[in-house]
Image (cartoon, rainbow, N blue to C red):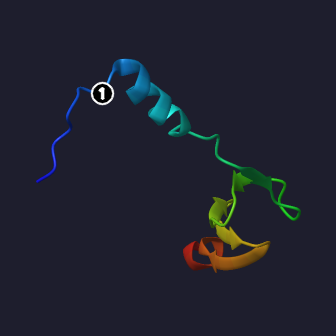
Amino acid sequence: MAHPKRKTSKTRRDKRRTHYKAKMPQIAICSKTGVSHLYHRAYWNEGKLYYKGKVLIDNSEAEA
């Protein structure tokens, strides 16, 4: 196996790691409900599961 000839300094190591940043999640606002949610994710609002502005599951009818 290959081994490093010299110890990697803290400065070199940290320079390499500068690109590993946590990014803020992108938030979308639904045009139908006005609820903020993550992009490309289904979300619940008032007993209904929405995705791309369409109702996928409606739990309010099942409970009644």
Indicate the quadrant containing the C terminus: top left, top right, bottom left or bottom right.
bottom right
Q: Quadrant of residue 53?
A: bottom right
Whole-percent x and y of residue 45?
Answer: 69, 59
Q: Quadrant of residue 51?
A: bottom right
Q: Is residue 27 left or right of residue 57?
A: right
Seen in the picture, residue 53 relative to 22 is either above or below; the reply is below
Residue that sits furthest to the left in the current view? 1
The residue beneath circle 1 is 8
Seen in the picture, residue 29 relative to 47 is either above or below; the reply is above
Whole-percent x and y of residue 30?
Answer: 82, 60
Indicate the quadrant containing the N terminus: top left, top right, bottom left or bottom right.
bottom left
Which residue occupies the foreground of this view, 30 or 16? 16
- Residue at point 87% right, 65% down? 32
Residue 47 in view = no
Whole-percent x and y of residue 17?
Answer: 46, 34
Seen in the picture, residue 48 relative to 12 is either above or below; the reply is below
- Residue at point 49% right, 28% down? 15
Q: Is residue 22 left or right of residue 16?
A: right
- Amino acid bearing label 1: Thr
Residue 64 in view = yes
Whole-percent x and y of residue 16?
Answer: 46, 35
Mark 1, Cα crowd under 10 Å, few <14 / some 14-19 / many 20+, is few
Q: Quadrant of residue 10?
A: top left
Which residue occupies the foreground of this view, 41 or 35? 41
- Residue at point 69% right, 70% down? 50
Q: Is residue 62 left or right of residue 51?
A: left
Residue that sits furthest to the right in the current view? 31
Callout 1: SS:
loop
- Residue at point 16% right, 50% down? 2
